[in-house]
Structures are given as structure tokens and as C-alpha cells.
Amino acid sequence: MAPLGRIPEATVARLPLYLRGLDAFPVGVTATVSSDELADLAGVNAAKVRKDLSHLGTYGTRGVGYDSAFLRFQISQALGVANVWPVVVCGMGNLGRALANHIGFTDCGFPVVAATDSDLDKIGTVVDGVPVHAPGELGDIVHRLNVAIGVISTPPEAAQGTADALVAAGVTSIMSFAPTVLSAPDEVEIRSVDLVTELQILGFHLHRVRIAEDS
Amino acid sequence: MAPLGRIPEATVARLPLYLRGLDAFPVGVTATVSSDELADLAGVNAAKVRKDLSHLGTYGTRGVGYDSAFLRFQISQALGVANVWPVVVCGMGNLGRALANHIGFTDCGFPVVAATDSDLDKIGTVVDGVPVHAPGELGDIVHRLNVAIGVISTPPEAAQGTADALVAAGVTSIMSFAPTVLSAPDEVEIRSVDLVTELQILGFHLHRVRIAEDS
DNA sequence: CAATGTGAACGGGTTCACAGCC
DNA sequence: GGCTGTGAACCCGTTCACATTG
């Protein structure tokens, strides 16, 4: 059966990995993948793969595996990768510029169509093909260019204000690299990538083993 | 009681947020924080704060709250933020350079002491204060400079090889920005920051509401 | 036989709600 | 009265194991 009810978040987060795994999959003589093989490619275990795929209503064939082409299609469909979601990068410092480059470069349906920065020297210029505007123009930009996703790479002080501006302009998807907790209405999806926090988590584990060694 | 058994991963991941929240906390007349206030600062709910802090064996005082200075001390202690963990950045492309800058800039106990890159033009130069070496020297670098953490910002093809080299050199903490699944022994802690995957997750939700609207 | 699909058991983390203490 | 500390309930996700099917 193809229940196709709500797909659990944890599953959604793995679908991109499966998709990537399938792309790396040698399209050999036989065009089928087993859950075991896919598990390897995605770095998870086979049970998880099967349960995840069952949420898509996808059918493999017992004793054989999944048709890799069809599976790729199914996952693409579920994720909606055919859509193009224009991105605006807010804050074109070192990190912002690198992000704009990276995101635009890997041509995955997330074109960076504009950027903002408060530096008067940057406003009006085009950096790596991306036009830089004043922060005040964010609303305009979003509307004119149909921006769907906002990336926040401003200094921490400016992050909440930028988020507010994005939300006010109707953006409901935000990816933030600022080391701050952002508040926004519930309907806004915020994914926060916090480098310092990540490092501190790594540091915690190093600290633990150091303590263990000293005992 | 101060059980101080194993601290749950989910709690560890939030401790940095509490620490940051405390730093932002106005050291007012009274030097106490309630779980409610801290919850706001960290963007979580109060019950979580209390349970998390209970794992540290920390004591607040009922009816009052937590002594903010002591709490800061306790969390710092638990995370081991007093330690300094030298970092090597592998791959000094746009992203790597920005990361090296960022991590080094926010002076948090993670000095970027070296970098590697396969580009012959970069090897031997010093970028933003960070000396760039050939990938083959990774082992040396790690030993000479006591590197504890490796950041992988190479192209995807080179990521696994770089991880292997880091592991071979004895590095047990890796932060990867490469869009690949890395394999490593269990004792190696890998934190993967996958920008494209993050964007695709955002895209999924945008896709969902678009579908919902069209129905 | 081989590999899927899935109910059932399990486990970690979150939330609730309230007893305990200032 | 206010706020902490914490058992209990709850929820989500993972894992297991096996019946099911090409």
C-alpha cells in the first residue's frame, strides 16, 4: 500500500542522502538496489532504509530490491527537487560570500539570486555574479525575485533583525549561520548551523576522554 | 544529589546555548537566573533547562533560581571550555578559508593552527595567518602541532581520503562540510554539516505547503 | 531463497505535573 | 508564593525479527 501520510522528519532528513547515494550508485547490469546496498551508500542501516522508503509508498520487490531509477524518481518527487527555490544571502562577509558561491555553484535548484550587506562599499556591486543590495531593500528583493529561502550570515547582532525582515517579507524558510537563537513565528522553518556550538560539542567529547585518561 | 553520570547527548548539545545565553544575560542587581529566563535565552522550554542542568549535578535554589556566575562556571567545567583544541582545516577553497577565518576569529579555544590544500600555488603560503601545507604533510602537522580537531572542506572526492589521513594521524574529532558520507572507526566523532542536504530539507517543506495550497 | 514490508519491542528524549524546599 | 528537582507519561525514532512474496 502507499499510505503516503506524513513523512517523519527523521526520514525527510535522510532522503537527500539516499538520493545522493543513488547518484553514486554504479548503474550496473541490473538496475536494482537492495536496502543493504543503499544503507552502505547513505551510511545508515538497512532496517532504517526500508522503513524510510515504506513511508514514501514506494515498492521494492521482495527477494530482489528496489528499481534504482524508479526509486530515484520517487525520492525526487517526495522531496520536490524539481522545484527551484531562489535564495537570498544576507551578510556578504567571508562566510556569506563563500556560502553564496557554494550554494550557487552546486547547481541543485537553489540559485542565489541576490545578497544584502550593510557595507556601503559592497552595496551596488556584483560579487561572484550575485548583486549586493542594502539590507533595507530586502522586502523588495524578496518580492521581485520570488525569494523562498533566506540565508543569514550576518554578524550575530544583526541576525534577529534580518530574520524579522525576512519573515515580514513572507519568507518562511531560513538557514542561519549566526551564533544566536532566532525567534520567529511557528510557521517559519529555521535551520541553524552553529559552528562554535558544533566545535564545543566535539570539545566536550575530547574533554571527556582526557578526563578518563587522567584517572 | 550530584549524580554526574553520563550526560545525555541532547543535553550536551544544548549546554553551549545555555552558556551563550548566560553571557548575554544582563548581570543585574540580582545574580540569579530562573529556568524560565534561561529557557528564553536559549530558545528551549523551562522543563528542558531544569532537566538538563540536573544532569550536571548543579543546584539552583528552589523558589529563587540559579546563581548565574556559578552556573556559568559549572557549564564551562562540564563542557571543558577551558581546554584549547588546535584545529587543522583541510581544503582551503572559498569555504575553507572562510571557516578558518571564522573559527579562528571567534576566539573560543579552537585556534586554527594549520591548513592543507592540494593547490600548489597555495602550499607554502600563509592565508589569513594560517600556514598552508601539502596534504601529504597532514600526519606531521597533527603531531607537531597537537591538532585535536580536523575540519574537512575539501571537494567531495577528496573527503574520505582526508578523513582517513586524519584518523591515521590520531585525530578523533572531525567536522566535515563535504557532501559525502564519511566512514571512520567508531571511536572517531564525526559531525557533518551538509549544506545541500539542509537546503533540500527546507525545500521539502516548501514543496509540501505548495502542494497543500494547490489542493 | 533472498530481500522486502511491518508489527512489536525498545530506548532516548521531551513534556507534564507535582512534591519539596526556599 | 515561587521556582526547582524529578518520577511518570508520552512521543518519536530505531531496531528486531519474522511473515510474506517474487
Image (cartoon, coloured by chain):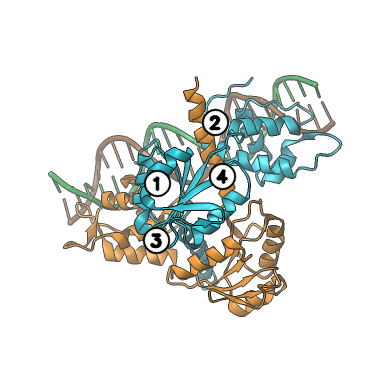
Chain colours: A cyan, B orange, C brown, D green
Residue wearing tag 1: A138
Q: Earlier in the sequence, mark 4 or mark 3?
A: 4
Q: Earlier in the sequence, mark 2 or mark 3?
A: 2
Viewer-nearest of labels 3 and 1? Answer: 3
Residue wearing tag 3: A120
**Are discs 2 and 4 both within one chain?**
yes
Q: How many labels does the image show?
A: 4
Residue at 27 percent of width and 59 percent of height = B25
Q: Which amino acid does label 1 sit on?
A: Leu
Q: Which amino acid does label 3 sit on?
A: Leu
Tell me: residue B34, above or below residue A212: above
Regarding residue B100, the answer to whether it shows in the image is yes
Q: Mark 1 lies on which chain?
A: A
Residue wearing tag 4: A111
In the picture as drawn, the residue positioned furthest to the right comes out as A29
Q: What residue type is labelled 4?
A: Pro
Q: Which mark is residue A7?
A: 2
Q: Earlier in the sequence, mark 1 or mark 2?
A: 2
Q: What residue type is labelled 2?
A: Ile
The location of residue B210, given as percent across then percent down, is 50, 28
Left or right: B163 in relation to B14: right
**Are discs 4 and 3 both within one chain?**
yes
Q: Would you say the residues marked 2 and 4 are in contact, meaning their CB atoms lie under 8 Å apart?
A: no
Asked which quadrant contains residue B153, the reply is: bottom right
Viewer-nearest of labels 2 and 4? Answer: 4
Q: Which chain carries label 4?
A: A
Q: Distance between the residues labelled 4 and 3?
A: 24 Å
Q: What element carries label 2?
A: loop
Q: Residue A166 carries which label?
A: none
